[in-house]
Amino acid sequence: MKSKNPFVALFHSLTECETCDSKVSAKWVEESWRELTKTTDPEKPVAAVMAALLLFDDRFQMLITEEECDQLVAIVGQAMEEYHRHINPTHHTGCKLADAIHPERQSI
């Protein structure tokens, strides 16, 4: 049943937004990184740690070709864009509502 109240309809629309269910967060990154580095043996690094080392420390880049490094950087770049989209979702309707409620707020 559709509500006649436009704010109720808007609320339902906003709660159905795909970014509302996102579990990705900065806290999640911190927890995962702490667990990953705590359980990794330097003699037998897991693939995730090796990928991080390839991106973070130029000394490890000799293990892969320049083309492979470029591909890794591109993949991680896409992942970073998605991460930022999840932790900072842009919802234009929500921004308009926030501007209406708090006129001193600047929309992004």
Image (spheres, rainbow, N blue to C red):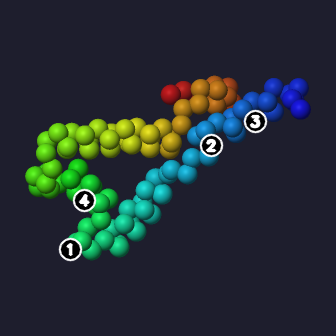
State the residue at coordinates (32%, 41%): 75
Looking at numbered disc 3 in the image, what kind of residue is underneath it?
Answer: His
**Mark 4 to mark 1: distance in Å?**
11 Å
SS at badge 4: helix
- Mark 2 or 4, closer to the camera: 4
Looking at numbered disc 1 in the image, what kind of residue is underneath it?
Answer: Glu
State the residue at coordinates (61%, 38%): 18
- Mark 3 or 1, closer to the camera: 1
The residue wearing badge 1 is: 43
Q: In the rendered structure, are the residues bearing label 3 and label 4 in contact, judged by CB atoms less than 8 Å apart? A: no
Q: Is residue 86 visible?
A: yes
Please identify the quarter of the rendering in which residue 80 is found: top left
**Mark 3 to mark 1: distance in Å?**
52 Å
Q: Residues within 10 Å of mark 3 (few under 14, many from 20)?
A: few
Residue 87: % across, % down: 50, 44
Q: Earlier in the sequence, mark 2 or mark 1?
A: 2
Q: Earlier in the sequence, mark 2 or mark 3?
A: 3
State the residue at coordinates (62%, 43%): 20
- Mark 3 or 4, closer to the camera: 4
Q: Earlier in the sequence, mark 3 or mark 4?
A: 3
The residue wearing badge 2 is: 20
The residue wearing badge 3 is: 12
The residue wearing badge 4 is: 50
Residue 66: % across, % down: 14, 42
**Mark 3 to mark 4: distance in Å?**
43 Å
Q: Residues within 10 Å of mark 1 (few under 14, many from 20)?
A: few
